[in-house]
Amino acid sequence: MRICLHGRPRPKQPRLLHFCFCLLGLVAICPERQWLRSSGFLVAGAAGCARLELATGARAAPESVGRGAWPHKSIQRRAAEGSAAAGGDDGSDIPRRLTLGVGLSLLAAVGAKRFLIDGPPEFDPAPRSLQGRTVLITGANTGLGKESAIRLARAGATVVITARTDEKGLQALEAIKAASSASDVHFLQLDLADLANVRSFRQRFQSQSYGEKLDVLLNNAGVMAIPERRQTKDGFEQQFGVNHLGHFTLVAQMLPLLKKATGFARVINVSSTAHLGATKENMEGDLMAPERYTQWGAYCQSKLANVLFAKELDRRFKQAGVKATAVACHPGGVDTDLARWLVVNSEDAAAAKKARKENAAFEAIGTFLTRDVQHGANTQVYLAAGADGGYDRSGGGYFDNMAPGLLNPVADDEALAKQLWTESERLTGTKLDVSSAAA
Ligand SMILES: NC(=O)c1ccc[n+]([C@@H]2O[C@H](COP(=O)([O-])OP(=O)(O)OC[C@H]3O[C@@H](n4cnc5c(N)ncnc54)[C@H](OP(=O)(O)O)[C@@H]3O)[C@@H](O)[C@H]2O)c1
């Protein structure tokens, strides 16, 4: 189609529009081709904008455009003249074109939200498919951990959630039981910012009726973008300390029970696409030097550590002949409490929720630029359910949208992963010997 601005002739029936509708029809019936759907909606968006441009700019006279006049002024002038001036345009066509343009642009926006941001439809493991499996989820009083607990409990798994306080944990426990209609859900307190607390965890876990083995460890808890450098009880920088070192110590604790899993066990590190923002240099030298601290730098570093750790753990599982796999994943940009430090500069999630409600910009970002927690939990639930073909598959993999994700090449640096392992052992005073760990 010829799009003719400034009064040159163009067809009455815009073929571009028809083409876009056909394209949309095609991509709508192509559920497995997300990139195709996304490009379809982007083309529709472009067409919508073109329509808007046709409606608002097409009728601007060359001289008025040349003088920098706004197109809508030109439209108003033409409408007032009531004439079909140069190019044969009829002013009465403008509302229709505007409506179509706005409509297509909205369609593109909804499509972009639906397919680019929300990702694939909700994934639910089949009822009873996880019976006999025990899953431990850290930081499950809210956000992705809580949603994962609901979905995995619904599929029949024995689910053990952790939270930093009894109050938060017990409250979440009731909510998870109610939402999943499952009773085999349990709570244990765990603070990853306190290594003494982490070290006491296995003994507390083992003393429970479900505590003789562990099939899936979902290392989900995390903190993000703390503006000022903070420290854990053990003096570690908070983001690296909680997101990586706390989980490293927990894996060492729970390894003997993972070795008793029914069939293959699995460790899942919930990382982030933010791991792409970290470099090799970020993983070397003094990992938590105060002068190196930036709020996002520390988060990216901790999330790259999650991937490096998963890959090295998987390699060591294989070398030691341990029936287990370790994987990492990115949940997408999800509407959870994770952004609390950005909203209220505090870890108070309730205050962040309140502040968000009062701020239209935060609310709009939260609602339109992120996926909801049901879509966000997909990948970790998929991996925790072994839906990638079984718990013995995908070892060392990094997943996004329930498929292999875009990986930082640094994550494949084996020497760096070994170095991180050794440094994590030194910092935490924990020997993580995959071959010898026994209950
Ligand atoms: N949301 C996203 O867009 C996104 C994107 C990429 C990756 N992720 C990752 O997804 C994971 C889950 O995050 P989310 O979005 O669900 O965030 P969230 O709603 O803030 O949940 C984080 C969980 O971690 C817990 N936690 C924080 N510090 C802890 C500590 N010291 N010890 C034990 N638990 C602690 C929190 O407990 P409290 O409530 O007591 O603080 C909460 O239960 C994180 O690892 C995050 O990095 C999220």
Image: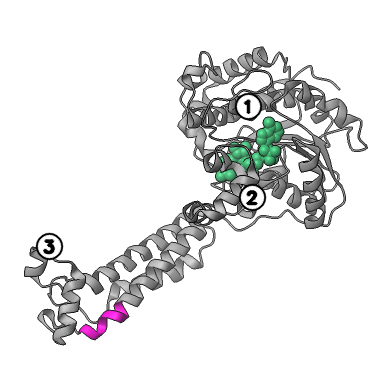
> Residue 427 location, x and y as percent?
65, 14
Q: Is residue 331 above or below residue 89?
A: above
Residue sitting nearer the eye, 185 or 131: 185
Q: Which residue is mark 2?
A: 378
What's the colour scheme?
one colour
Q: Residues within 10 Å of mark 2 (few under 14, many from 20)?
A: many
Give SS at disc 3.
Answer: loop
- Is the stretch drawn in magenta largely helix, strand or loop? helix
Residue at 75% x, 47% y is: 149
Residue 244's disc number: 1
Residue at 47% x, 20% y is: 292
> In the image, which residues are magenta?
91-97
Would residue 155 be visible to someone looking at this image? no
Q: Which residue is mark 3?
A: 68
Residue 92 in magenta stretch: yes
Residue at 13% x, 85% y is: 81
Q: Nearer the viewer, mark 3 or mark 2?
A: 3
Q: Is residue 23 above or below residue 401?
A: below
Residue sitting nearer the eye, 400 or 338: 338
What amino acid type is highlighted by mark number 3? Gly
Q: Is residue 312 above or below residue 170?
A: above
Q: CA distance from mark 3 to mark 2?
A: 51 Å
Image quadrant in which you'd find residue 383:
top right
Q: Ligand 1 is found in which quarter of the picture?
A: top right
Q: CA distance from mark 3 to mark 1?
A: 57 Å
Residue 17's disc number: none
First in sequence: mark 3 or mark 1?
3
